[in-house]
Image: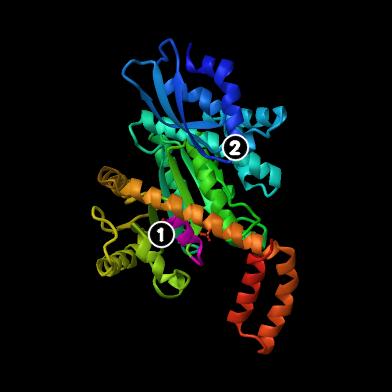
Amino acid sequence: MNIPMLLQHSHQHFLKGLLRTPFRRYHFIFHSSTHLGSGIPCARPFNSLGLHCTKWMLLSNGLKRKLCVQTTLKEHSEELSDKEQRFVDKIYSGLIQGHRACLAEAITLVESTHKRKKELAQVLLQKVLVYHREQEQINKGKPLAFRVGLSGPPGAGKSTFIEYFGKMLTERGHKLSVLAVDPSSCTSGGSLLGDKTRMIELSRDMNAYIRPSPTSGTLGGVTRTTNEAILLCEGGGYDIILVETVGVGQAEFAVADMVDMLVLLLPPAGGDELQGIKRGIIEVADLVAVTKSDGDLIVPARKMQAEYVSALKLLRKRSQVWRPKVVRISARSGEGITEMWDKMKEFRDLMLASGELTAKRQRQLKVWMWNLIQEGVLEHFRTHPTIQEQIPVLEKKVLSGALSPGLAADVLLKTFKSRD
Ligand SMILES: Nc1nc2c(ncn2[C@@H]2O[C@H](COP(=O)(O)OP(=O)(O)OP(=O)(O)O)[C@@H](O)[C@H]2O)c(=O)[nH]1
C-alpha cells in the first residue's frame, strides 16, 4: 500500500482531524507492512491536502517513514467550496502550463481587495510556492528566475530600454515578464509604468508578459502584490522578471527588497534631470547604466560614466563578490546592451555561487513578512472602533498643545492593548 492509499483509507481522516487543530507542524510515523516507495512522489498527496512535507526519512527496513509535515494552507483550503477549489485548481494548472490568461487572472486575484478573493489568492500562492520548491529541487537549488529591478528618473529612457532589451532576451530564448511598481498610480488612478503603449513591440511578443502597476492601494499594498506577482510569473515559466519603478520617492527602495539585482538607468545629464533621484538609491544599485549614449550625447555620457565610477568607489562594500559597475548604453543604436546583459549574468552567477543570492532572498522574505505584519497591525489598529472614536479627539488635543504627541500615542496604544 502506498502513501496515497494510506491517506485515503486510514490516515486521511486522521490527518484531516489534525488539520483542524491549531498546531502548525506535525511529526508522523507511518507504519506499513509493505514498502512505501520513494520519497519525492509522496509529497504530492500531501500537497493536494494542503500539506507540505518538509522532511522525510526512510528507515533502514524501508517500512517506517518519519515525516515532518507543515500545514499552512489548511485554514483556507479546508473551507473552500467545491466551486472555489475548482476555480483555484483551474488557475493553478493553467498557470504552470504557461497560459497567459491564467497568469493574468492569478495576478488579478492577488491584487483583489475583496476579503474572500484575498483568501483564495493565498491558497493559490501556497500551491505555487510548493511548485517552486519542487522545481528548485529538480534544478539543484538554482532559482527559477532572475529578478531584476529597474529604476530611473522620468525620461531616463526606461521604456525604450525595456523594449530593446526585452526583445533581445526573448530572441535568445528567454521568457520575460515586466512588472511595475508605480505608487503614483494609486493617487492618479492610472498607471504610467508597465503601460503597453510604451513598449508596443514587446507587448506583442508571446514570450513577454507586461503587467502595469495596480491602480489602487498604498505603496505597501502595491509592493505586496508585486512580490506575489513575481512568484506567479515564475510559476508561469518566466525566467527573467523585470520590476520597473520611477526613481523618485520610496518605491525604488521597496523594489530593492524584492529583486536579486537593482539596475539604475540615468540619462547623460546631471543637474535638474537628476534632482528627482534620491542619493540613497545609488548606494543600493548593483549596476548603473548611463542611457542615450549615442550621437551628441556620447561625450556627456562618457563624462557621467567616469563621475559615477569614481563616486561608486567611495561607497561601502555591500558584497564580497561584486562591486557596482557603470556601463553606457543606447537603446537607439543598441550599443552596450549586450555587454550590460553579460555583466548582469556575471553578477547573478557570482552571487549564486557564493551563496549571497540565497542569503539575500532569505533576507527579503523576512522583510516581506515583517512589512505585511506592520501593515496588518496598523490596519487593525486604525480600524478598531474605540481607537477610531478616540483618534480625532486626541489629535485635536495634540494640535492645541493640550497633550504631547507621545502621551496621546500612549493613550491610544493602551486602549488598543486593553481592548479585550
Ligand atoms: N538619443 C536617445 N534617446 C533616447 C534613448 N532612449 C530613449 N530616448 C528618448 O528619451 C525620451 C524618454 O524615453 P522613455 O523611454 O520614454 O523614458 P522613460 O524613462 O520610460 O520615461 P517615463 O515614461 O517618463 O518614465 C524619449 O523621447 C526617447 O525617444 C536612446 O537610447 N538614445
Q: Dot 2: few (<14), some (14–19), or many (≥20) neighbours within 10 Å?
A: few
Q: Residue at x 49, y 32 (%)?
A: 52
Tell me the kind of residue under disc 1.
Answer: Leu
Q: Secondary structure at mark 2?
A: loop
Q: Taking 318 as reference, is 166 above or below it?
A: above
Residue stretch rendered in magenta on the structure? 248-258
Residue position for label 1: 265
The residue at label 1 has a CB less than 8 Å from ligand 1: yes
Q: Residue at x 66, y 47 (%)?
A: 112
Residue in front for this viewpoint, 35 or 191: 35
Numbered tag placed on residue 21 in the rendering: 2
> Considering the image in quadrants, where does the C terminus appear?
bottom right
* Alpha carbon separation for disc pair 1 and 2: 51 Å
State which quadrant residue 58 falls in: top left
Q: Please tell me whether residue 253 belongs to the stretch shown in magenta.
A: yes
Q: Residue at x 65, y 60 (%)?
A: 380
Is 49 left or right of 42, judged from the image as shown? Answer: right
Residue in front for this viewpoint, 200 or 61: 61
